[in-house]
Image (spheres, rainbow, N blue to C red):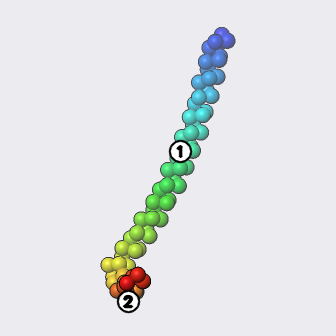
Amino acid sequence: MSQDLEERLVRLETLISMQDQMIEDLNQVVITQQNELDKIKYEFESISETMMNGGGDSSYANQKPPHY
């Protein structure tokens, strides 16, 4: 192989390797965000269900704020 062709090949291999690492890093970010979204969704559904079933401690909900 000529020197120029070999340099181009090495450069391409390096770029592919860097892209593979970037894709893996981004995939980990997506996985982490999806886990966080799943947790938030579960908490929201739990709170929503509690509110639909009477809101838990209704005596607290009917109290006037302290500034009144």
Residue 27 place in picture, x, y as percent: 52, 46
Residue at 40% in and 69% down: 44
- Residue 46, image quadrant: bottom left
Residue 26 place in picture, x, y as percent: 53, 44
Q: Check the image and name the residue furthest to the top.
A: 2
Please identify, in this view, whether the residue under mark 1 or under mark 2 is nearer the observer. Answer: 2
Residue at 50% in and 50% down: 30
Q: Vertically, is 6 above or below 57?
A: above
Residue 42 place in picture, x, y as percent: 43, 68
Q: Amino acid at mark 1?
A: Leu
Q: Residues within 10 Å of mark 1 (few under 14, many from 20)?
A: few
Instruction: Write down the residue under mark 1.
Output: 26
Q: Check the image and name the residue furthest to the bottom.
A: 59
Instruction: Say which mark, if any, is on residue 59.
Output: 2
Residue at 45% in and 62% down: 38
Disc 1 and disc 2: Cα gap in Å?
A: 47 Å
- Residue 59, image quadrant: bottom left
Q: Nearer the viewer, residue 10 or 40?
A: 40
Q: Amino acid at mark 2?
A: Ser
- N-terminal label among 1 and 2: 1
